[in-house]
Image (cartoon, rainbow, N blue to C red):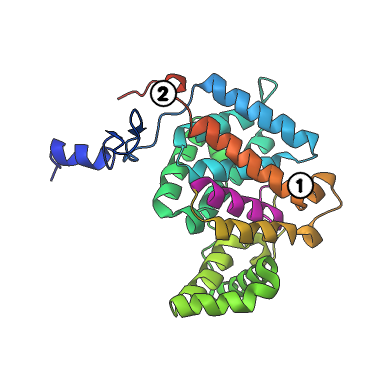
């Protein structure tokens, strides 16, 4: 049964209209968020943003997997599917030339895996809609689409599920360190199932690297320990309003140092300066993408 035009319009309209302030003459309170994502900024603006981010990352020794994790999670969190597609197009190329297939697969798989893991941080609907946009970009490249992995890594046997629970518990303890026992108790106090669900089913099959509980080699696109902390910081900081959780995952990033290879970029990221760089990068992306003026945005095609 089709919905009426009036009902569909109400679904898509802003939650409330813009209005003049009662207390500040000349000030307008902006309209509430609408049911559809904002139009993306113009492609040239986004390309400048991504080039700047890539150069800045390189100046600190930060490699593609880490800055792409940070930027992808940020765009998922602010619900910017059209911008996400521009980012995908950008990382598929180098110097105006299409990257080799293996490199394109690695980058597309990383973006897809980051998007999946945001489920536990930004909510299922946003993750689904942005993964759909990302898949549309993948499908526009027939060669890439034909070589993307299609086998689920989370269809687990009972034994593998138990291993994922252990991996999730270890990851939770590693991120929260001495605070872990107390936090588990707090979560259980809020709701008896909350800690069980978060530790076993979010930190387990979702957040812990699947290669870990499959005892398989780690692909270049795996969301490893450092990338998971970057993903969490970006997802939480970009959506706003959850500073306590951002602080927890900043500490988690600093605690990831024992897991890193002897690589300057990873050492930087797991320092306080690196955490500040990550937060400032997220802020810059939010300013350009979410804070763009209407004149800077692409014309929406109805």
Disc 1 target residue:
273
Q: Is residue 178 at all visible to an observer of this figure?
A: yes
Q: Position of residue 205 (x, y in %)?
A: 56, 65
Seen at 42% across and 54% down, the residue is: 124
Indicate which disc residue 288 carries. Answer: none
Mark 2 Cα shell of 10 Å, populated few (<14), some (14-19), many (≥20): few
**How far apart are labels 1 and 2 at the CA level?**
34 Å
Q: Position of residue 64 (x, y in %)?
A: 71, 39
Mark 2 element type: helix
Q: Is residue 174 magenta?
A: no
Q: Is residue 277 left or right of residue 89?
A: right
Residue at the right extreme, as displayed: 262
In the rendered view, tell whether residue 228 sits above or below residue 293.
below
> Do labels 1 and 2 touch, CB within 8 Å?
no
Comparing 271 with 267, the one in front is 271
In the rendered view, tell whether residue 155 sits above or below residue 158.
above
Mark 1 element type: helix
Seen at 80% across and 39% down, the residue is: 61
Which quadrant is the C terminus positioned in?
A: top left
Disc 2 target residue:
294
Q: Position of residue 219 (x, y in %)?
A: 69, 51
Q: Is residue 141 at all visible to an observer of this figure?
A: no
Seen at 64% across and 55% down, the residue is: 228
Q: Quadrant of residue 207?
A: bottom right
Bounds of the magenta segment? 220-239
In the rendered picture of this protein, how many numbered marks are placed on residues? 2
Q: Choose the circle earlier in sequence order: 1 or 2.
A: 1
Q: Position of residue 262 (x, y in %)?
A: 87, 52
Mark 1 Cα shell of 10 Å, populated few (<14), some (14-19), many (≥20): few
Q: Is residue 256 left or right of residue 120?
A: right
Comparing 86 with 96, the one in front is 86
Q: Is residue 176 left or right of residue 58?
A: left
């Amino acid at each position: 049964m089709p919905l009426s035009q009036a009902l569909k319009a109400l679904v898509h309209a802003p939650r409330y209209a813009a209005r003049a302030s009662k207390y500040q003459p000349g000030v307008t309170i902006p309209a509430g968020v609408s049911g559809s994502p904002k139009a993306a900024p113009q492609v040239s603006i986004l390309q400048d943003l991504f080039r700047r981010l890539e150069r800045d990352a390189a100046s600190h020794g930060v490699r593609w997997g880490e800055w792409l994790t940070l930027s992808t999670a940020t765009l998922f969190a602010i619900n910017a599917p059209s911008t996400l597609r521009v980012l995908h197009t950008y990382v598929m190329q180098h110097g105006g030339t299409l990257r080799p297939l293996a490199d394109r697969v690695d980058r597309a798989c990383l973006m897809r895996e980051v998007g999946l893991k945001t489920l536990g941080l930004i909510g299922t609907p946003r993750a689904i809609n942005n993964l759909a946009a990302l898949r549309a970009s993948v499908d526009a490249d027939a060669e890439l689409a034909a070589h993307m992995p299609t086998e689920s890594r989370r269809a687990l046997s009972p034994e593998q599920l138990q291993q994922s629970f252990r991996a999730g518990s270890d990851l939770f303890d590693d991120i929260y360190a001495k605070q872990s026992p107390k936090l588990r108790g707090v979560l259980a106090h809020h709701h008896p199932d909350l800690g069980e669900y978060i530790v076993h089913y979010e930190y387990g099959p979702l957040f812990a690297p699947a290669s870990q509980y499959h005892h398989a080699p780690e692909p270049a696109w795996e969301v490893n320990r450092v990338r998971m902390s970057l993903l969490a910081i970006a997802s939480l900081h970009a959506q706003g309003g959850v500073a306590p959780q951002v602080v927890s995952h900043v500490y988690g990033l600093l605690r990831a140092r024992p897991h890193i290879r002897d690589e300057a970029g990873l050492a930087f990221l797991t320092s306080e300066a690196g955490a500040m760089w990550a937060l400032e990068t997220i802020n810059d992306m939010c300013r350009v993408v979410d804070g763009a003026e209407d004149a800077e945005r692409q014309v929406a095609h109805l």
